[in-house]
Structure formats: C-alpha cells, structure tokens
C-alpha cells in the first residue's frame, strides 16, 4: 500500500501501523538478535524485520478477540462477527 501511494504521488512520512495478535512475532520483528535463534524462518520473511528497523512499519499488539482481520482469514465465532461488523461500517 505504501508503494502504490508513493507511485501516485503521496509519499508517506510516517510509519504504517500493523496490528498483530502474536506477541512473539512483534518481539522478533523489533529485536534483530532473536533472528539468529530462529533458523526455521525462511529468508524471504526478513522483509518485516527490515521494514520495522527502517520505521516503515510499526507493529502493535491487538488481542485476538479484537482482531478484525480474523473475520476474513478463518472461521470465527458469531460474537467475533458481531464485534467486527460495526467496526467495518457494515450493516447486517
């Protein structure tokens, strides 16, 4: 999204917030020392670490129950749908 906005002539001078419900993922992205211990990660996934270090992305923890993106990525309980629909400005 940042790249396409820049191509359209809207350069961003601030970091994009990335809401994540995985505290370990946030810790690994913010602390490069953890990467040496995580040999199972594919090298192509290091883009997140680089983007965080360059302040392009700012990862923020969001509890799983409040993660609206789960609505689009997996089967969820009805209460998650009831929580997410108003946040997305959708009508039932």
Image (cartoon, rainbow, N blue to C red):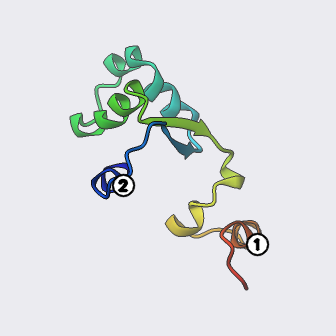
State the residue at coordinates (69%, 45%): 63
- The tag on residue 82 is 1
Residue 53 is situated, as x and y percent measured from the top left of the image, at: 39, 24
As drawn, which residue projects farthest toward the left?
A: 43
Classify residue 30 as left or right of residue 44. Answer: right
71 vs 46, left or right, is right
Estimate the spatial distance between the alpha carbons at disc 2 and disc 1, rounded to whole Å: 32 Å
Q: Nearer the viewer, residue 2 or 74?
A: 2
Give the number of the disc on residue 90.
Answer: none
Q: Is residue 47 left or right of residue 86?
A: left
Q: Position of residue 76 (x, y in %)?
A: 64, 68
| Residue highlighted by disc 2 | 5
Q: Quadrant of residue 38?
A: top left
Residue at the (35%, 18%) spot, across then down: 37
**Sooner in the amino-acid sequence: mark 2 or mark 1:** 2
Q: Secondary structure at mark 2?
A: helix
Up-down: is 68 above or below 23?
A: below
Count neighbours of disc 2 (C-alpha within 10 A) and say few if under 14, some if 14 to 19, many if 20 or more. Answer: few
Foreground tag (2 vs 1):
2
Instruction: Residue 52 in the image: state x and y as whole percent.
Output: 42, 30
**Which element is circle 1 on?**
helix
Q: Is residue 22 above or below residue 49?
A: below
- Asked whether the beta carbons under mark 2 and mark 1 sit within 8 Å of each other, the answer is no
Front in this rendered view, residue 37 or 67: 67
């Amino acid at each position: 999204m940042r790249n396409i906005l820049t191509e359209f002539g809207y350069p961003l001078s601030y970091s994009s917030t990335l809401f994540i419900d995985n505290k370990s993922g946030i810790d690994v992205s913010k602390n490069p020392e953890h990467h040496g211990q995580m040999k199972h990660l594919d090298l192509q996934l290091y883009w997140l670490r680089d983007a965080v270090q360059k302040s392009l992305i700012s990862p923020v923890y969001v509890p799983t129950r409040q993660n609206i993106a789960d609505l689009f990525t997996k089967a969820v309980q009805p209460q998650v749908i009831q929580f997410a629909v108003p946040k997305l400005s959708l009508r039932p």
